Every structure is written in structure tokens, then in C-alpha cells.
Image: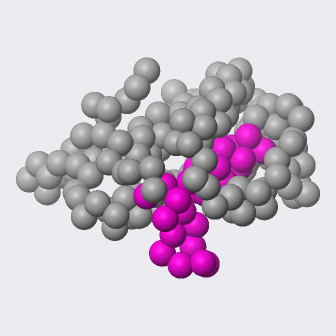
Amino acid sequence: MDPGRVFLNESRRYVIEEYPTKIRACLDLLEDADLWWRPNDQSNSIGNLLLHLAGNIRQWIVSGVGGAPDTRKRQAEFAERGPLPREEVLRRLDETLADANAVFVRLSVASLGEARSIQGRETTVLHAIYHVVEHFSMHTGQIIYLTKQRTARDLGFYRDAGGLAVPEWERRIRR
């Protein structure tokens, strides 16, 4: 298969399936108050991270790559102290992911080298996607860590099979 197509397919899988599935599994274990808890004033709550992910994906993929208007208010993502209802925060993320999925579906391999200007930076479609995958991964890890900190539970995303990590999170994908 064409490496460009593999890149697009894998990027879409991470952004649309893997990371949101792991985040939802975390949210299923948390009380509403846990979404807005922060270990200190320099750290973000899970609620802030979810708002931030929705803003980042919308700006970089939906707007930057897909061409929709950029209406992001980045500072508001971090300023929110909640508690916004869990359903509202998830609705924002879900709507953004649906819009991002539509962009991924229509992207061609040939578009990966196309120039874009996002957040005042000159970049390419490939770099914008790579940025979003990396950024989403980092914040998913933070949400996982905060969930473990709040619940003291193993989240069971992987099972050890004789030294091999078998992904169990895939069973949770909501289609």
C-alpha cells in the first residue's frame, strides 16, 4: 500500500478511534467533580484538556486542513473552571471528531504536501496531521494519568501475553 495512504489511515485511526476510546473509558470511571479537579494551578483538569483537544483538532484539521472558518478561542479552553456538564464537553469533542473524520475521509495522498497556514505558522497538510496525532497522544496520556491518580485503578488497556502487550482497548470502540 502507498505510504501516504498508510499515514492517512493510521492518523485517522488514532484521532477518530484509539484516543477517544481510551478517553471515554477514563471518563466512565470518573465522577463529574473529577473532570474539573487539577493537582495545582499550573496544571489542567481533564475538562480543560477535553476542551483544548476539541479546539486544537478543529483549528488544525477541520479549519487548517479542511478549510472551515477558524473560530478558536484557545485561552478559553484553559480558563474554564467548570463544572461544565460532562455531556457538553463530550458533545464538543464528538462534533469536532465527526467534522475531522469528514476531512480525513476526503483527503488524498497528493494533498499531504500542500501548504497551509495554521496558528500563524506555515506548514503542510502532512505536518498538520502529524502535529494533531502527537498532540492528541500527549493529552490522552495526561488524561489516563489523571484518571489513574483519581481512581487508583488499572485501566486495562493492554493485557500481557507472555511479554507481548495485547490491546484490550479495541473492544471498547464505539462505532
Q: Residue at x 22, y 57 (%)?
A: 154
Look at the image and tell me whether residue 17 can be seen. Answer: yes
Horizontal and vertical percent for residue 43?
57, 73
Q: Residue at x 89, y 35 (%)?
A: 69
Residue 174, quarter of picture: top left
Q: Residue at x 47, y 34 (%)?
A: 17
| Magenta segment, prevailing SS (helix, strand or loop) | helix
> Please, is residue 166 above or below residue 42 in the view?
above
> Please, is residue 158 above or below residue 15 in the view?
below
> Please, is residue 113 above or below residue 151 in the view?
above
Number of dots carrying numbers: 0
The stretch drawn in magenta includes residue 135:
no
Look at the image and tell me whether residue 6 can be seen. Answer: no
Horizontal and vertical percent for residue 91?
60, 33
Magenta stretch bounds:
34-59
Horizontal and vertical percent for residue 11?
56, 39
> Please, is residue 108 above or below residue 49 in the view?
above
- Work out whether residue 89 or residue 15 is closer to the camera in this orientation and state it: 89
Q: Quadrant of the C terminus?
A: top left
Residue at the limit of the structure toward the left, as seen here: 162
Horizontal and vertical percent for residue 133?
58, 48
- Work out whether residue 50 or residue 138 is closer to the camera in this orientation and state it: 50
Residue 112, quarter of picture: top right
